Amino acid sequence: MSLRERLGGLFKSQSELDLTSGPIPQSLFYLSVPIVITNMLQVAYNLADTFWLGRYSTDALAAISLGFPLVYLFISLGLGLTVAGSVLVAQHTGAEQPAEAEYAASQTVVFTLLAGLFLGILGFNFVESLLQVFGAEPVVLGLATDYMEIISLGLPFLFGFTVFIALMRGAGDTVTPMLVMFGTVVLNVALDPVLIFGWGPVPELGVEGAAVATVISRGSAMVVGLWLMVRGRHGIQIHLREMWPDLEYSKKLLRIGGPASLENTGRAISVNLVLVIVTLFATPVVAAFGVGLRVFSMVFMPAIAIDRGVEAMTGQNIGAGKLDRVSTTNRFAAVSSFLLLSLLGVVTFAFAPEIIRVFDDSPAVVAEGARFLRWIAPTFGFVGILRAYSGGFRGAGKTLTAATIAVVLFGFIRLPIAYVASQGLVPIDRWIFASPTPEGIWFAFAVSGVIAAVVAAVWFERGTWRDGDLTGGSATDEGPTTEAEPSPTASDD
């Protein structure tokens, strides 16, 4: 009996899931659970680095805390293409257009790899200048530069595996990426202590060792993922003959993926600019912020998984013309995400110091990290709502709407509040905080999350997503009313 068969009680393969019919809770559950596990495993890369470097030195931990938002920025610049590919594959799959889905997948792969190569070269050459913006202490800045130069060179590997996950998800297969991710995380966890501390003939590399371990693991994942897509026995298939860059098709990918990149980049820039404010305080605060962000990322894995599951279900149901099912799916996802994340918020609030202490037991880091978590934990449920509706917008091809919510609310609400509240620039701050204090930054995270959730819910319920059919048909509640466009590969066949 295969591993997939043994896990059949918890996971369902692509052939066992029909995202356009059947019970919505069951479909979303079986689609999202593997994404939760995959994302948790993905975060394990960063958590392993944080765990071992926290025991190596506080400076090393602060260095990757400084580098993490920049990694997020680089990834966000290129991941819009993977979103575009996922949405196109989902909608063409729902519309029963397999040739178009495979062409979309093949083109997405080649353009994503090119984007990873370009950003990797760019990052390697300019990472030191970018990090200097944060104004960190010289020792921390030097270590962060060493870490980020290696990570930059590994961006093509990261992008290659990420596009594999996105395309398989669009086709309705989330189990295969989970299994691949598990193997590569095991590899990363095994390599981290060996390369960071040195073992036998392997020299002690410190921060650089953590980066090398991550790149090796990501590279292994990319090779396996691309091999599986070329074979085409799971999820979606790609064809080498269709991977020559089609500049006309790239316009479609950019039209959908550009705003998605803007959404992710807006979030990333927001985190990086918040980090600039954080670095106005002492190194323990910087380290606490870095640990807090990683915990924050781990807690939000279920919400992100629901987000991605809703994206795939929305795309396939729009392709199939089942718009009422789209509305029901998004509302169910929002409520479920709110309840689940609120429960995790209660646990995080109760055990905040213990959670931080797992990564760094320095009293100053534990105290500030716990304050950060306790400010944001009560608002976890609202961010779950935001994530659910954002997935719906993207699945409908309304990536610009999702981007607008992210950029405006996080860029124009979180940042000003964080700076003003932490620096005591208005009298009201002195009634709430001992000024200046990093608590003003933590307060801004909480407020912006609540506002973003309310705006996303109201915007989605207005129904502006309903004209998001990208398959060449006309999506209605009864189904497509016109024939789809001919296969982009018809002339090649």
Image (spheres, helix red, strand yellow):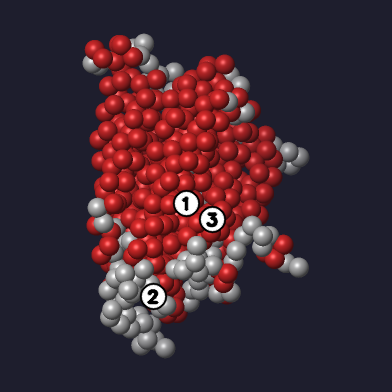
Earlier sequence position, callout 3 versus callout 1: 3
Numbered label attached to residue 29: 3
- Helix or strand or loop: what does disc 3 sit on? helix
Q: Of 71 and 167, which appears nearest the observer? A: 167
Percent across and percent down for residue 98 are 44, 78
Earlier sequence position, callout 2 versus callout 1: 2
Graded by Cα atoms within 10 Å as few (under 14), some (14 to 19) or many (20 or more), the crowding at tag 1 reads many
Numbered label attached to residue 210: none
Q: CA distance from mark 3 to mark 1?
A: 8 Å
In the image: residue 134, left or right of residue 158: left
Percent across and percent down for residue 384 are 43, 43
Q: Quadrant of residue 106?
A: bottom left
> Image height check: is 344 above or below 389?
above
Percent across and percent down for residue 21 are 46, 68
Which residue type does callout 3 highlight? Phe
Graded by Cα atoms within 10 Å as few (under 14), some (14 to 19) or many (20 or more), the crowding at tag 2 reads many
Q: Mark 3 or mark 1, which is nearer to you?
A: 3
Numbered label attached to residue 95: 2
In the image: residue 73, left or right of residue 364: left
- Helix or strand or loop: what does disc 2 sit on? loop
Which residue type does callout 2 highlight? Ala
Please identify the quadrant where the C terminus is shown: bottom left
